[in-house]
Amino acid sequence: MNFRNISAWSIRNPMVPIVLFAALCLAGIVSFMRMDIQQQPDIEFPVVIISVAQPGAAPTEIETQITQRVEAAVRAISGVSSISSTASESNSQTLVQFEVGEDVNAAVNEVKNAVDQIRSELPEGILEPQIFKATTTSEPIAYFAVEADDMTMEQLSWFIDDTVAKRLLSVEDMAEVKRYGGVDREILVTLDPVRMQALGVTAGQVNAALRQLNVNASGGRTEVGGSRQSVRVLGNAADAYALSQTEVPLGTGRSVKLADFARVTDSYGEVESIAKFNGRPVVTFSISRARGGSDVTAYDGVVEQLAQLEKDHPGVRFKRMFTSVDYTKEQYESSMAAMVEGAILAVIVVFFFLRDWRATVISAIAIPLSAVPTFWFMDLLGFSLNMQSLLALGLVAGVLVDDAIVEIENIVRHMRMGKTAYQASIDAADEIGLAVVATTFSIVSVFLPVGLMPGISGEIFRAFGLTVVVAVLMSLAVARMITPMISAYFLKSHGHAEHAGGPWMARYLQVLHWSLDTARADAYRARRAARGRPARRRASSASCPCRAAMAGYAPPTGWAVRCWRACAITGCG
C-alpha cells in the first residue's frame, strides 16, 4: 500500500478504516464530554506585575523609596521591552513588559531574583512583594451582592471572608473570592498622650512590645512521659480585653499595663469602599476561575453552594449582579446549533445536485466522521471550547463535506458510464485523489500560519487556526478512506445513464455556449476577408515568418504593432 492508492487499499480492506474511525470517534466523544467551556482561551501575556504595599505611606515616599529602586533592579534583565509604574497611597505597582517570544515563567523567576536582591534596600514597613504574570484567568466571571437583616456591616464582611469564601473555594475550578465594600475587622489601640507622658511611655515602646509579645511561636520539641511532643509558645491575646492587660516594659525596669494609658477595642478599620445594590448598602464579592478550568463548571458550582448557604443561614440573601457565563453558555449553544444547521443544509444541497439518496447519505456521514475526531486532537493540544475554537468549528462545518462531495460525484459519474460501484469507486478515487489533496492542503496552507503566529496575536488565534487545520485534515482522511469504501459497497449501479443533465444544467449550458459564441467573430473575419484585408489573428513564431524575421530587434510585447503590415501582406497574422 502507498498513500497514492490508499482509497483502493481501503476498498479492498474495509475493516481497517472502519475500526480506525470508530476508535477516533469514541475518543472524540470522550474528549468532548470532558472539555472545558470558556469564553476566552487561557492566554499568558509577556507582562510581569510587581506589587509592593506599605501601609500608611504617601505616594511621594512610595515613589522614591520603592518604585524607583524596583525599576532600577528589573531594568537590567534581558528581554525587557518597557517598564511602567504607578505610585499611589500605600502601594507601588510596576508592570514589566518583555519582548514577544520570551518565556513568561522564566521572566517571572528573573524578576523575583532581581527584587530579592534589593529587598534589604526597601523600607522595613513594607509587606512581602507580590510578583505574578498577567493572564486572562484573573478576570472575574461573576459578581454577587449579599444582604442580611440580622447582621451589621462588620459581621456581614466577616461572614463573607470566613464562611462564604471557604465554602466557594472548595468548588471545582474556583480560584479566588474577592470582597468589595464592607469593612475589615481590626483591634484598635487608642493611646492617651497625657497618660503616656506621665508614665514615660513612648509609641515606639508600645509598638515593639505588641510585636514581640502578641504572637504565637514554635518552642521546639521536648520529652514528656517518655514521648516526644511539640512545644508552642502562646502569646496571642484571645480578645481585646486580654490584649489590654499586656505589660509594656519601661526602660527603668518597670512595666505598666496597656490599659493604663490606652483604650483597646474590637472594631473595624477605615471604610475605603462602599457597595450599593438597588440603592441599599450591601457587601459584594466576585469569583474567578482557576487556570485551565471551566467557566460554566465554576459558576454552576458556586450557584449551588450559595443556595445551600441561604438554607443554612435563613437571614442571608445572595443577589446576582453580573456574570459573563450566560454569554458563554449562549455562545456555546449557538455554535453547536450552527454546526448542526450547517451540516443539514450541506446535506440538502448535496441531494439537490446528486439526486441520489445513497450518495447523499455517504456525503452526510463525512461531517460527523470529520468533526467528532477533531475534539480528540483539540484535547491533545490543550484547547477548550471557547470563542476561537467554536468559531473554527462553525467555519469548517460546510468545508468538511467538500472533499467527500468531490469524491462521491466522480464515483457517480463513473457509475453512469456503465461501471459497477466497486470498480467505479476504485477508478474515480484514484483519478480525483490528487485534486482532493491539493484542495485540502491549500486550506491548510492558509490557516496553519495563523495557528503558528508568535506573540499575543498567536496566543489568541492559535486555537482557531489549528482547529481548522485538524478538522480539514480529518475531512481529507474521510474522503480518501471512508467515502470510497462505503461507496463501493453501498451504492448501486444502474448502467449507462446521463450525467449532469436536467433542465437547470441545460440552461447553464446555454449560458455557457452564449458566452463562448464565436459567430460574431467569424462574421467579422469574413467581412475583412471580403475587403481584401484578412482578419487579425495572433500566430506563434513558428508559423509567422515575419515575426521570426523581426525577432532580433522587435521587443516581444510590441511585436503585434511593429509587424502588423508584414503579417497583413503575408496573410499569417
Image (cartoon, grey):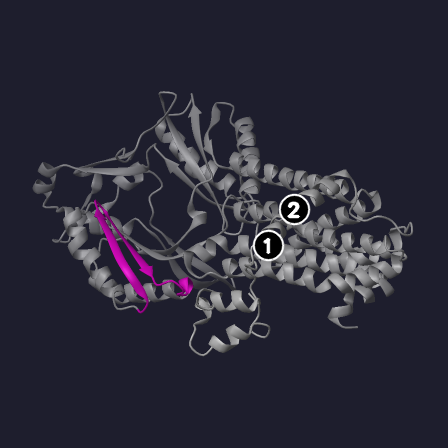
Number of marks present in the image shown: 2
- The C terminus sits in image quarter: bottom right
Q: Position of residue 567 (x, y in %)?
A: 52, 67
Residue farthest bottom in this picture = 552
- Residue segment shown in magenta: 78-105
Name the kind of residue labelled 2 in the image.
Gly
Q: Residues within 10 Å of mark 1 (few under 14, many from 20)?
A: few
Report whether 372 appears left or right of 195.
right
| Residue at image coords 86%, 57% | 488
Badge 2 density bin: few <14, some 14–19, many ≥20, Cα 10 Å: some
Horizontal side, residue 477 vs residue 58: left or right:
right
Residue for point 57% across, 44% down = 37
Specify the quadrant that holds the N terminus: bottom right
Question: Does residue 83 show up magenta in the picture?
Answer: yes
* 568 lies left or right of 526: left
Q: Which of the 4 image quarters holds residue 13?
A: bottom right
- Is there CB contact under 8 Å for labels 1 and 2? no
The answer to whether residue 247 is visible is yes
Disc 1 marks a residue whose amino acid type is Ala
Mark 1 or 2 closer to N-term?
2
The residue wearing badge 1 is 530
Please state the horizontal and vertical placement of residue 16, each as a whole percent of the image. Answer: 82, 63
Q: In the rendered image, which residue does mark 2 sit on?
A: 398
Foreground residue among 541 and 476: 541
Residue 524 horizontal/vertical position (percent): 58, 51
Q: Nearer the viewer, mark 1 or mark 2?
A: 1
Is residue 473 positioned above or below 236 on the image? below
* Residue 226 horizontal/vertical position (percent): 52, 64
